[in-house]
Image: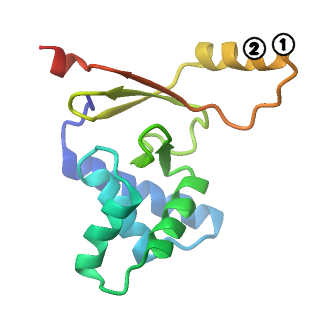
Amino acid sequence: MLHCANHTSCVAEALQNAESICKERGVRFTNIRRKVLQMLWKHHSPAKAYDILDTLSKEDVSARPPTVYRALDFLQENGLVHKINSLNAYVGCSHPLKHDDCYFLICEKCGEIEECCNHVLNDAIEATADKNKFCLKHINVEIEGTCQGCQA
């Protein structure tokens, strides 16, 4: 599903974007935050916190769940990753800080996730919330189905 021509390049770009965003915001892009983000981008598929911990603990025996959760919280707060609630997993953001409210196409067969943005969809959701006097905090739409690659 993901349109990545050069995987090494997109991982490097994600890390470079993270460094720039953190520098601009005056926050630290620590080694653990870098490793967690790199793990999320490594395969372009969602990863659960404990999967990240398992991988991380092979490199750093002192890694604990709070360490991973703090790193994920930091990355999410700074627009570098998204939490996929239906899977209780995380994915790297393909365009950090450009859109807050994206939606996700989740392939039930291969597990890949496509991050999409559509202002018409967001406008419709916001209009519905306004009509119902509902104060939106965050829009997170997850659509499950089968990607084109798995349909073939």
Q: Quadrant of residue 39?
A: bottom left
Q: Where does the C terminus fall, quadrant-wise?
A: top left
Vertical comparison of 76 with 135: above or below: below
- Left/right placement of residue 30 relative to residue 146 reads right
Asked if residue 78 shows in the view, the reply is no
At mark 2, the secondary structure is helix
- Left/right placement of residue 114 relative to residue 133 reads left
The residue sitting at 27% across, 32% down in the picture is: 2
- Residue 14: give x, y in percent of width and height: 38, 52
Residue with the most extreme left position: 152
Residue with the most extreme bottom position: 62
The residue sitting at 24% across, 50% down in the picture is: 9
Residue hosting label 1? 131
- Residue 13: give x, y in percent of width and height: 35, 52
Vertical comparison of 140 with 131: above or below: below
- Count all numbered tags in the image, as a single digit: 2
Residue hosting label 2? 128
- Left/right placement of residue 115 relative to residue 131 reads left
Q: Quadrant of residue 125?
A: top right
> Pointer 2: residues within 10 angstroms few (<14), some, or many (20+)?
few
Front residue of 47/35: it is 47
Asked if residue 17 shows in the view, the reply is yes
